[in-house]
Image (cartoon, grey):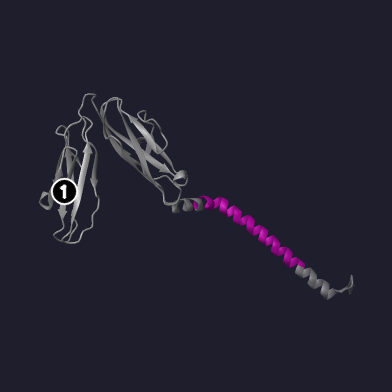
Amino acid sequence: FMFGGMRWRDLRACLVDTAETTALIFLILMGAEIFNAFLALSQMPQELGQVVGELNAPPTCSIHVGLPVVRTGEQSVLVANVRDEDSPLEAVVVRWGLPEGDSLVEAPQLSASEGLRTIFSAHAPGLYAVACQADDGLARGPIAKALVEVVAPNSNLPPTNVVLTPLVARLAVGESALISASGEDPDGDLLTFKWRPSDRLEAVLDTPEASQVRFEATEPGLFRVRVSVSDGENRAVSR
């Protein structure tokens, strides 16, 4: 039997090959439809997106308070220090508010609810918790909190801008390091500096604005030096 110049055996083999190819294409298309239906039912894309989001380390923020204690009617500048290991800082949004559980609520005392900087206006005496939270679009970081104390208009304010330098010193036994502290007083009060531990420190400089001591490394170990700054009116500020 001949068909178009082809023997029946050759024609039969060609038809079988065509049928197998068509069946394979059909199975591939049907498999794709079944897989899409499975994804829709299992919500796997959402779960995969959640996994990708979890791989992104959330940003963190901390708060620097310009004036921890302010009089009623005055202001204190708050600055957010932001860190993000996965996103540029330009992509991170910082939100401000009052902490309420795991969220932030609007704070009428703050000049801005977003940004790296906001201003706290002291309307009434009290102790206020202010918070910020960083968001890089993929994850929200933990809420950071800071306290601002508002006192009466005629109150005496504690020392501010207390600085201790250096913060870390590495010494060999027999070496020494000079450690300095300074501060300011909003009311012009004279400041006094008290160092600890006193048995390891030798006074070098002592003025109403600054103090300096020498630490002698007589033995190996890790030693912590602290200083308390007082204006004679308020509780001392320690570093």
Picture coordinates of residue 152, whole percent (x, y): 23, 25
- Residue 102, magenta (yes or no): no
Q: Which residue is mark 1?
A: 213
Q: Residue at x 56, y 53 (%)?
A: 39
- Bin the neighbour count of mark 1 within 10 Å (Cα to Cα): few under 14, some 14-19, many 20 and up: some
Q: Tell whether 216 sits left or right of 53.
A: left
Quarter of the image with the C terminus is top left
Q: Nearer the viewer, residue 38 or 76?
A: 76
Q: Name the spot of residue 19 as percent of width and height, x first.
A: 75, 66
- At horizontal 76% and vertical 69% (from top left) the residue drawn is 17
Chain part drawn in magenta = 18-47
In the figure, is residue 183 to the left or right of 20? Answer: left
User: Dividing the picture into quarters, in which one does residue 126 lie?
Assistant: top left
Please tell me whether residue 164 is drawn above or below residue 124 in the rendered image.
below
Q: Does residue 28 lie above or below 146 as drawn?
A: below
Residue 28 % position (x, y): 66, 61
Report the number of numbered marks: 1
Secondary structure mainly formed by the magenta segment: helix
Residue located at (19% from left, 38% from top)? 209
Asked whether 23 falls inside the magenta stretch, the response is: yes
Locate residue 45, reporting x and y percent: 54, 52
